Amino acid sequence: MRKLLRTFIRWVLRDEDSDRPKLASATSFDQDAQAKFRLGVVHAMNGRLLEVSTYKHNPHGPDWTTELFIVPEDQTLAQSITTILTLKSVK
């Protein structure tokens, strides 16, 4: 059984010039892999809220700041998200 497993692992990890993707690993501690901005939709009784969280580096632990925006009834969700992303890019 071990020989079959080793043969399979060698077959998967073989180094050929093919279009097949190579196996790689990634850690969750990569600086670029962490989210800096989160967007969520909260369904309320009379409409929707957009929950926007932004990340600020803190050596003592993660520091997320959350803001809530009301989506007006006459505005689509896409228009509201576009407006909020524009406001966040200006800051």
Image (cartoon, rainbow, N blue to C red):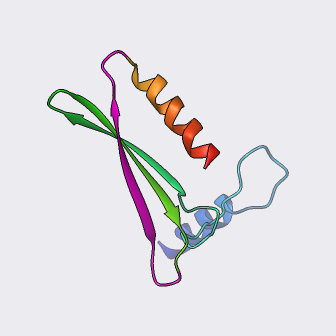
Range drawn in magenta: 59-74
Residue 89 is situated, as x and y percent measured from the top left of the image, at 62, 44
Q: Is residue 73 above or below residue 66?
A: above
Q: Nearer the viewer, residue 45 or 25?
A: 45
Q: Nearer the viewer, residue 84 or 34?
A: 84
Q: Quadrant of residue 40?
A: top left
- Which residue shows up at 55% across the image and 62% down it? 34
The residue closer to the viewer here, 33 or 6, is: 33
Question: Where, by quadrant of the figure, is residue 77 drawn?
Answer: top left
In the image, is 63 to the left or to the right of 13? left
Q: Quadrant of residue 45?
A: top left
* Relative side of 39 to 4, left or right: left
Residue 70 inside the magenta-drawn segment: yes
Q: Residue furthest left?
A: 45
User: In the image as oriented, which residue stretches furthest toward the right?
Assistant: 17
Q: Is residue 85 magenta?
A: no
Q: Position of residue 64 (x, y in %)?
A: 43, 64
- In percent of width and height, residue 19 lies at 78, 43
Residue 59 shown left or right of residue 72 in the figure: right
Query: Does 28 appear above or below 58?
Result: above
Q: In the current view of this chain or complex, which residue is farthest to the bottom?
A: 60
Measuring 72% from the left and 46% from the top, which residue is drawn there?
Answer: 20
Q: Position of residue 69 (x, y in %)?
A: 36, 39
Of 46 and 12, the residue lying toward us: 46
Count of marks, rendered view: 0
What residue is rendered at 53% in x and 67% in y? Answer: 56
